[in-house]
Amino acid sequence: MSSKTTLQTMDAELSGWKEPLERLRQALHRDELALYCQPIAALTGDVRFPMAEVLIRLHEEEKALLPPGEFLPIFEHYGLMPDLDRWVVRKVVQHLARGSRIPCFTINVSGQTLNDAAFPKAVAFELVSVGVRGTALHFEIPESETLNRLEAAVRFAAAIRAVGCGVIVSGFGRRTATFLPLKTLRPDYVKVDGVIVRKLLTAPAAEAKLRAILRVGEVMGFQVIAEMVEDQDILTRLKALGVGFAQGFGIQQPYPIEHMARDSTAP
């Protein structure tokens, strides 16, 4: 399917969007997007949720909230992902400045943003403007981007670390059979893909791959986060293997970032 056909299909699904580019710009300008987050649990230590991943939804008149799969491809088609990522950073930093029960948020960045040399400077500006430390943000680079845009990912990681922020490689193990991207990027955390995590109790190869990632992490100095943890048996096994962190519906479902306010009674 061509990119033109793909866009036409998306436009058909979003029939109310007569001018998609203008609709996206309007959403950014009018703050018509909503931030959700999914806490990441520490499997050892006293702090239960030291981090949370930021997720995004879009307000629509006929639908309460659109999931990212329905609008992110259109942002990407029009080259607006860096603008969207800037918007997310600004809103997360403002949330942190108001007070948050979770001290650190992880933000996914697109391939377009990896190539945006001005993005780390924009992050620095947002942090300084409200007095939030860079350590409060970690940026997630998908494994696919480390394979397809390794040089850009390395440049981005160096620039974002200069601001004081951390780097995470997410979805690791789904495609790659090499640790070269990790050796080159030197991330602070590696998120092991749910394809491995979900098979942990039924496929010896999945556990072997996870053990290999843990060994490399010990040598290289990164910590491991297990993605898509959905039941307690897997969580118990992760703890036994020495995985430091876990995330998934079996731990905590996503909810609005406002519930992370310091005075919130939400879980």
Image (cartoon, helix red, strand yellow):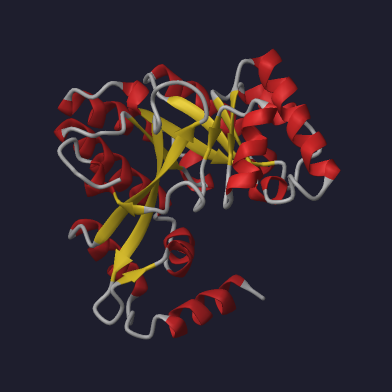
Q: Quadrant of the N terminus?
A: bottom right
Residue 159, percent from left and from top: 45, 23
- Determine the image quadrant of residue 260: top left
Number of marks in the rendered image: 0
Instruction: Reply above or below: 236 against 23.
Output: above
**206 on left or right of 189:** right
Residue 102 in the figure: left or right of residue 245: left
In the rendered image, residue 192, in percent from the top left (x then y), is placed at 64, 39
- Residue 76's spot in the image, x, y percent? 47, 59
Q: Nearer the viewer, residue 68 or 113?
A: 68
For this rendering, which residue is in front, 139 or 246? Answer: 246
Nearest the camera: 147 or 210?
Answer: 210
Residue displayed at 51% across by 51% down: 250
* Residue sitting at x 72%, y 46%: 196
Is residue 72 visible in the rendered image? The answer is: yes
Check the image and report above or below for 197 versus 239. below
- Indicate whether 168 appears above or below 259: above
In this rendering, position of residue 38 left or right of residue 140: left
Residue 30: horizontal and vertical position, in percent?
A: 17, 60
Q: Quadrant of residue 263?
A: top left
Position of residue 97 in the picture relative to residue 227 (left or right) = left
- Residue 156 in view: no
Q: Which residue is rendered at x = 67% and y = 45% of the image?
A: 197
Instruction: Say above or below: 251 vs 157.
Output: below
Of the 4 image quadrants, the one containing the C terminus is top left
Report the residue that reaches farthest toward the right: 204
Residue in view at x 18 percent, y 31 percent: 97
